[in-house]
Amino acid sequence: QKEVEQDPGPLSVPEGAIVSLNCTYSNSAFQYFMWYRQYSRKGPELLMYTYSSGNKEDGRFTAQVDKSSKYISLFIRDSQPSDSATYLCAMSGQGGSEKLVFGKGTKLTVNP
Amino acid sequence: GAGVSQSPRYKVAKRGQDVALRCDPISGHVSLFWYQQALGQGPEFLTYFQNEAQLDKSGLPSDRFFAERPEGSVSTLKIQRTQQEDSAVYLCASSLDLNEQFFGPGTRLTVL
């Protein structure tokens, strides 16, 4: 079993839909949780960064962390075709000074 | 510079050849990471530098892989005697404040 599990999809939704992406993990030492967006043939770009449990909102994006269940989620409201990308969850025990452990990534397509 | 840059962007090597991949981190960033991303997978950690010190090389898959950052800025990842299983995108990331890791566009290596 991998440390971080993420359903690779693909996920296809109509424009305007609410998208829910999630990851589970097994390592209790993880304290920092991130969501990256990766367009084809580009490097990952940080979307959301959360420390410990709780919710964080930024525009159309909401990240949730439930450490008791070892489960993290990313919600995208009013999805747009430009949101079409692969979404990677990542986590670490010590933030930016430590290696990130990534999920496999979920490929999302938002259809106009 | 404005972001992390990597060169070359694409590299084709014949099996058995040596390759060198370059990473220019964001100016002033102390931490530098190398990751390997196979097709359809999330990035996997290779090695980590803090300034010129290589603090973690636990992710390097074999002794054919070698990384250096002699002056604490530019880093080079070298792969000797390349094999087909080395074909992947090699991503470099840098960070300053122990939080966000900024990724470069990656070098896509194809070993024939």
Image: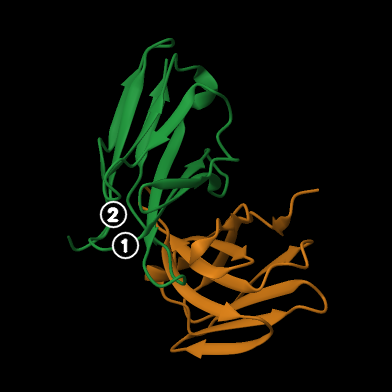
Residue A50 or residue A57, whichever sits in front: A50
* Amino acid, disc 1: His
Indicate the amino acid at tag 2: Pro
In the image, what residue occupies the spot 45% across and 17% down? B82
Alpha carbons under labels 2 and 1: distance apart: 7 Å
In the rendered image, residue A19, in percent from the top left (x then y), is placed at: 58, 76
Q: Secondary structure at mark 1?
A: loop
Say what secondary structure mark 2 lies in. loop
- The disc at residue B25 is 2
Label 2 neighbour load within 10 Å: few <14, some 14-19, many 20+: many
The chain letter under disc 1 is B
Indicate the quadrant where residue B18 lies.
top left
Please indicate whether residue A29 sits to the left or right of residue B75 in the image: right
Q: Colour of chain A?
A: orange
Do callouts 2 and 1 mark residues in contact (Cβ within 8 Å)? yes
Q: Is residue A63 left or right of residue A37?
A: right
Mark drawn on residue A79: none
Establish if B57 lies above or below B13. below
- The quadrant the C terminus of chain A occupies is bottom left
Circle 2 chain? B
Pinpoint residue A51: horizontal percent, then vertical percent: 60, 80
Same chain? Circles 2 and 1? yes
User: As rendered, which of A103 and A11 lies closer to the eye?
Assistant: A103
Of all residues shown, which one is farthest toward the left?
B1
Query: What residue is pinned by disc 1?
Result: B29
Give me the chain that's green.
Answer: B
